[in-house]
Amino acid sequence: MSENSSTSRLQVTKFKLNALLEVTQAINENPSREKLLSRYETLLRKELKIGKILLYKLGENWECLLSSGLNGAQYEIDVEKDLLGFEGISFISSDTRSQVKGFDIAIPVIRDNRHLAIALIGDIDEESEGVSPVIKHLHFIQTLSNIIVVAIENIRLNEENVRQAAIKKELELASRLQEMLIPGAGRLPSGGAFSVSAFYHPHMDIGGDYYDFIELSRNQYGFCICDVSGKGISAALIMANFQANMRAIFNCDILLEELVQRLNDRVNESTMGERFLTLFIGKYNTRTRELIYVNAGHNPPLLYNKATKSLTHLESHCVGIGMIEEMPPIVARKLIIEKDVKLLCYTDGLVEILNEDLVESGTDVIEAFLANRDPIAGNIDEIVRHHGILEGNKSIFDDITILGFEFS
């Protein structure tokens, strides 16, 4: 081997080591994706005299990160079909799919046993003498491609982590704001003519369930429980809008039939018929002991009389809110509430919890815990404990809300 040849090899080796060192040092300075790709292109095209480069990377979908030296040539490449067959450094033969002809080498970047990226490398001057730069620097190109692609992936993951952290912070704030819309224990009556207890558990950070309790006058109280179709942010926004409308309209003078019709109009206006909600809404007069209610497609609340040990389901007699523009005639139902009676309202997330046989639990558990002389607050606690709702039961797939009344 000549001295000139040895010197040349030493210079090339030194260049490659310095290039890798420079790239890794640059990565530590948190460069942008564009800067990394620019340095990658410069090293391959200008320093190593590589003719052409195509670099594809998998993010949410396959994306072409770099297209260089193609001189206007168009390559319609389907990465899934045309490139994922290359498991390691592969020479592109003449019988390879026509979409990748014109390139010499396919260099996949594989991480965790899956393709993260694929580089296609080729020479422009196929007739030039000497060893092709692609062949001469193949392993360096592979190493450089791995470093650059992994660095770009780390940038993407870091950006995703920052985005997810911001979303989480926003959801935590939204969750706190949503809790402010729903009356807590301190805003519910305890003792006297009747007591009210509630439990609210969104499946995600925020949910589409809602309950409310309003003092309408000295002797009249209004309440409701509802469940917006769907889950998550969109359901929570509809719930907040519904809460604002309901509180603006609900007063001691309005008939429930008119209230429900107006709520239906408001929901249709805000959702354009794409979402609906089920609703149980009532008025209770402590002087006359009269309960007036409308069940608009909601799960039937349970009314339990301690003295007679009778259990009554307050069935639905009206379509859900927002299901149709013009609701059929609404007729509110009336009941005289006797002493020692309990009323339990709930959303469908409670009865859809799967039991050990992977069957929905239904109302049997609720009825079993309600049908006794224990206070309604204790009944709700027992139901929650039985289903392991606060312990992260994996069989829960929806928001769960319970609203209970104890009439003395």
Image: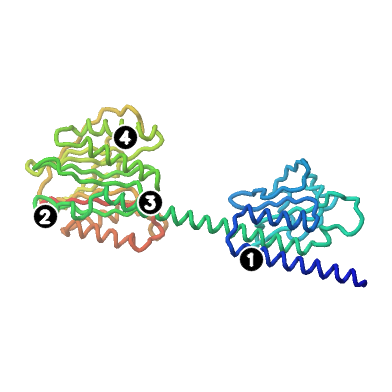
- Residue 191's disc is 2
Q: Earlier in the sequence, mark 3 or mark 2?
A: 2
Q: Residue at x 33, y 59 (%)?
A: 389
Task: Answer few, some or many: residues within 10 Å of disc 3's Cα (few below 14, many 20 plus, some between 14 and 19).
Answer: many
* Residue 227 position (above or below residue 253): below
- Tell me the element at label 2: loop
Query: Closer to the camera: disc 4 or disc 1?
Result: 1
Q: Which residue is mark 3?
A: 398
- As measured in the structure, the alpha-carbon distance from the residue carrying label 3 to the one carrying label 4 is 21 Å
- As measured in the structure, the alpha-carbon distance from the residue carrying label 3 to the one carrying label 1 is 49 Å
| Marks 2 and 1 close (CB-CB < 8 Å) | no
Q: Earlier in the sequence, mark 2 or mark 1?
A: 1
- Residue 403's disc is none
Q: Nearer the viewer, residue 321 or 179?
A: 179
Q: Earlier in the sequence, mark 4 or mark 1?
A: 1
- As measured in the structure, the alpha-carbon distance from the residue carrying label 4 to the one carrying label 1 is 66 Å
Q: Which residue is mark 1?
A: 25
Q: Position of residue 11 (x, y in %)?
A: 81, 68
Q: Which residue is mark 4?
A: 319
- Tell me the element at label 3: loop
